[in-house]
Amino acid sequence: MPSASASLDFERPLAQVKALFFDVDLAVREKIHRGIRLQWLPRAPSGERRLRRQLRVLDKMVVEEVVIERGADDTWVERFVEGPNAGTRFVGHFEEEGPNLSRVRLEAWVGPGGFAQGLGKLSPMGLEKAMKRVLGEYKLALQGYEPGHARGAVLTALAVATKWIPAMRALDETRRRHAVAVLLEVAWSIACVDEPPDEAERDAMRAVVAAMWNATLDAPLEERMVRAAVEGVRKHGPQARFAHLGQKLASIGFAELGIEIAVLLAEVSHGLDASELDALRTLTLSAGLPEETLRDAIRRIDLALSGGEPLSRMSTFV
């Protein structure tokens, strides 16, 4: 038997509610777990993703690691794998109540040490209240949620980058087209360094193109660029590929802009993986820019995507 359970109705179709719960990146970008600092850990070879969560309780920092994954019968499972709550898991069951009404039933299976939050271990009633609060935060996050779209203030994150627009518009047509092509090649390559770009990254790239150049990427062109980026990283390896791309950025005279867009693409979906961070470092140094340029870009864009609250997320770049 579970240690506690709670349920809540969502006024949205079941498919959208499921997408919300399995969109782990949303927990980072939109701060579902308020008051907790979140950090993506490098992806395991098996593909497993872990979030490190830090919570300050009085003068003590509590650190734990969790995994969110799909369980049996299409359940949503959050497992606590490191920290004081190791061994605990939350299991969410999804039930369709109507065309636009869904119910999520959340069960807690507490590990051998009990479940601690804040100043101490929760009683069954306290645990139930905590679960209801988590469900309420997901319900709040569902407002305006569109599966597969880049969340976070993408255009705000681009605000610094827009200062290069006049200089780019001043180029003749041939040079401008070449510069844009290089910038897109760099951004798609960063998005592909760990795996093919997901829908949030694709959506962010479309926002970049619309905001920076008042243009659109048609589907065939987008697919060609993604395939070329994947093949370039695979054929040459990340180190050589991004060293070459850094030199191309320097040659067009828009190296800082290229770093800004590349950081946005790396951050927008799930924060920085170790592989993305290595690629960005190589890109920056090969473009002739100091490492501090990259640090500044990561801090600013991370802050913009997290809604302007620096304590809501932590970058792996410290």
Image (cartoon, rainbow, N blue to C red):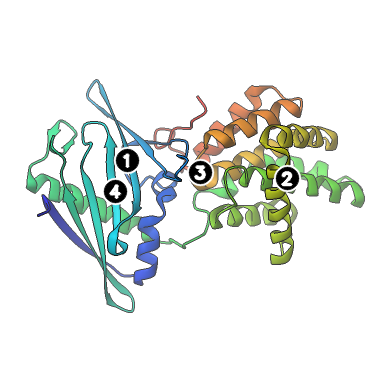
Name the residue carrying label 2: 232
Counting residues from the N terminus, which is met first, the one under dot 3 or under dot 1? 1
Q: Residues within 10 Å of mark 4 (few under 14, many from 20)?
A: some
Instruction: Write down the quadrant of residue 297 in the picture.
Output: top right
Q: Looking at the rendering, in which quadrant would you find the N terminus?
A: bottom left
Counting residues from the N terminus, which is met first, the one under dot 3 or under dot 2? 2
Name the residue carrying label 1: 66
**Disc 1 residue type?**
Val
- Secondary structure state at the residue bearing disc 2: helix
As rendered, which of 241 and 177 lies closer to the eye?
Answer: 241
- Residue 290, image x and y in percent? 69, 22
Cα distance, mark 2 to mark 4? 36 Å
The relative height of residue 7 versus residue 283 in the rendered view (above or below) is below
Identity of the residue drawn at 63% across and 29% down: 294
- Secondary structure state at the residue bearing disc 1: strand
Q: Which mark is residue 305?
A: 3
